[in-house]
């Protein structure tokens, strides 16, 4: 089949390779020539479209024009912004191509952290206590809180925009300084990181919103150190996380791929939902290495074919984002370097995979490195990554 793939990042690489091996023709949309996907040997064709991070309208127009003109059998969105654009224009796009993004109302139940957390609290699904300052009066919220707390965007990415407050006075001063512009914020109980662990569950649901696959990944290292992009991942067995993920995603009637992030609360030993990322994770290569062909699952879902249930996957697969892991190493304390497991210095082995480097697709690492250099050479990007600015 002719497949249009809308993202050029890390998550696209195992998809392109798998689809190529299955005999499909992949047209890859790139936002820049300096990217992993553009340097891959597997796409049949590469297109340069407007950058959806800065020009959503331009990207949407290019997408609709392309599917109207060329009518690819399936269009796959793997990233946050591309998935949102598909959800927002679902009915128009479905006239010309098949997709795997769920309906808009369901999509925003997962995309909006306020909605996700409200659902979790209503259904008694473990999560940090969360307040919506747009709905609840901020003075009343402050009286209910135990400090410290965090304030973050309700639709943000990773640690970008996260701020921590240690007193009611400090929090109220900040919120009042926004002059009522609280629409995209949430206030959340702070869960201490010490003696805790972060996890993510890579789930895939069929068209009837039934979880068929749930891969659980432990995140022993991430950058920035206070929470952000995972730099090392390991596949693990956590039936408690699988069950919580099932309750959450089936409860909101999700369809297709979703990544649910968790933090282990060291105070009670319970993994708690932090957020849903309504797409596959950027490090999904670990899932392919663990024996789950997510590309095939997307094709099956788009075509209305049955989704096989898969409860077992390979444990102990160790995936690394080596450039970000190097940043972790240089910022980590000596104790963190000595106690991290798997070891930072474990570079080779049959169960180790690198998210952006592959002997079978050797130039993708160059594309990733050049893209990172370009991205972080922009003013303010490094500060944003470190979570010091609030958009």
Image (tube, rainbow, N blue to C red):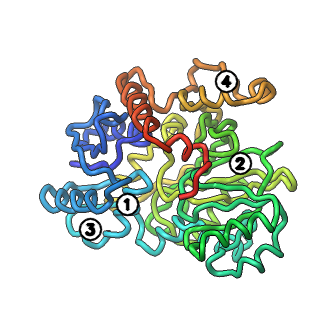
Label 4 vs 1, first from the N-terminus: 1
Q: Is residue 211 left or right of residue 207?
A: right
Residue 309, given in percent of the width and then of the height, sits at 52, 54
Residue 28, given in percent of the width and then of the height, sits at 27, 43
For mark 4, does the 10 Å Cα neighbourhood hold few (<14), some (14 to 19), or many (20 or more) residues? Answer: some
The local secondary structure at tag 3 comes to: loop
Q: CA distance from mark 4 to mark 2?
A: 23 Å
Residue under the point 69% across and 81% down: 136
The local secondary structure at tag 4 comes to: loop
Label 2 vs 3, first from the N-terminus: 3
The residue labelled by disc 1 is 100
* Above or below: residue 107 compared with residue 202: below
Label 2 vs 1, first from the N-terminus: 1
- Residue lying at the far right in this picture: please name it: 267
- The numbered mark at residue 94 is 3
Residue under the point 15% across and 62% down: 68
Of 186 and 85, the residue lying toward us = 186
Query: CB atoms at circles 3 and 1 under 8 Å apart?
Result: no
The local secondary structure at tag 2 comes to: loop
Residue 110, given in percent of the width and then of the height, sits at 54, 66
Of 318 and 69, the residue lying toward us = 69
Residue 41, given in percent of the width and then of the height, sits at 28, 29
Label 3 vs 1, first from the N-terminus: 3
Residue 213 appears anywhere in the view: no
Of 81 and 268, the residue lying toward us = 81
Eye-nearest disc, 2 or 3: 3
The residue labelled by disc 4 is 344
| Count of numbered tags | 4
Q: CA distance from mark 2 to mark 3?
A: 37 Å
Q: For residue 352, which quarter of the picture? A: top right
């Amino acid at each position: 089949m002719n497949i249009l793939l809308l993202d050029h990042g890390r998550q696209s690489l195992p998809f392109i390779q798998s689809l190529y091996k299955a005999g499909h023709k992949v047209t890859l949309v790139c936002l820049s020539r300096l990217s992993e996907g553009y340097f891959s040997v597997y796409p049949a064709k590469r297109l340069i479209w407007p950058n959806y991070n800065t020009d959503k309208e331009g990207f949407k127009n290019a997408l609709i024009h392309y599917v109207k003109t060329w009518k690819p059998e399936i269009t796959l969105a793997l990233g946050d912004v591309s998935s949102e654009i598909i959800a927002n224009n679902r009915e128009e796009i479905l006239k010309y191509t098949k997709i795997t993004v769920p309906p808009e109302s369901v999509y925003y139940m997962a995309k909006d952290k306020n909605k996700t957390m409200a659902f979790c609290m209503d259904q008694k699904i473990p999560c940090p206590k969360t307040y919506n300052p747009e709905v609840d009066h901020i003075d009343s919220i402050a009286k209910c809180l135990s400090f410290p707390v965090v304030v973050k965007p309700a639709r943000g990415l990773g640690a970008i925009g996260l701020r921590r407050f240690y007193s009611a006075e400090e929090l109220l001063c900040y919120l009042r300084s926004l002059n009522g512009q609280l629409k995209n914020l949430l206030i959340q109980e702070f869960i201490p990181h010490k003696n805790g662990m972060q996890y993510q569950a890579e789930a895939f649901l069929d068209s009837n919103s039934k979880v068929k696959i749930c891969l659980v990944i432990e995140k022993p290292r991430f950058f920035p150190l206070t929470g952000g992009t995972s730099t090392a991942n390991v596949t693990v067995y956590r039936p408690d996380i699988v069950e919580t993920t099932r309750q959450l995603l089936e409860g909101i009637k999700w369809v297709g791929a979703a990544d649910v992030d968790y933090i282990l609360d060291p105070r009670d030993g319970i993994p708690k939902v932090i957020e849903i990322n309504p797409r596959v994770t950027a490090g999904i290569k670990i899932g392919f290495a663990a024996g789950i062909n997510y590309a095939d699952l997307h094709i099956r879902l788009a075509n209305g074919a049955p989704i096989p249930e898969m409860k077992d996957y390979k444990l102990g697969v160790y995936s690394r984002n080596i450039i970000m892991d190097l940043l972790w190493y240089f910022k980590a304390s000596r104790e963190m370097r000595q106690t991290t497991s798997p070891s930072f210095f474990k570079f080779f082995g049959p169960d180790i995979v690198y998210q952006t480097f592959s002997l079978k697709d050797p130039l993708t690492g160059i594309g990733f490195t050049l893209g990172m250099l370009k991205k972080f050479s922009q003013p303010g990007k490094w500060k944003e990554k470190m979570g010091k600015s609030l958009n």
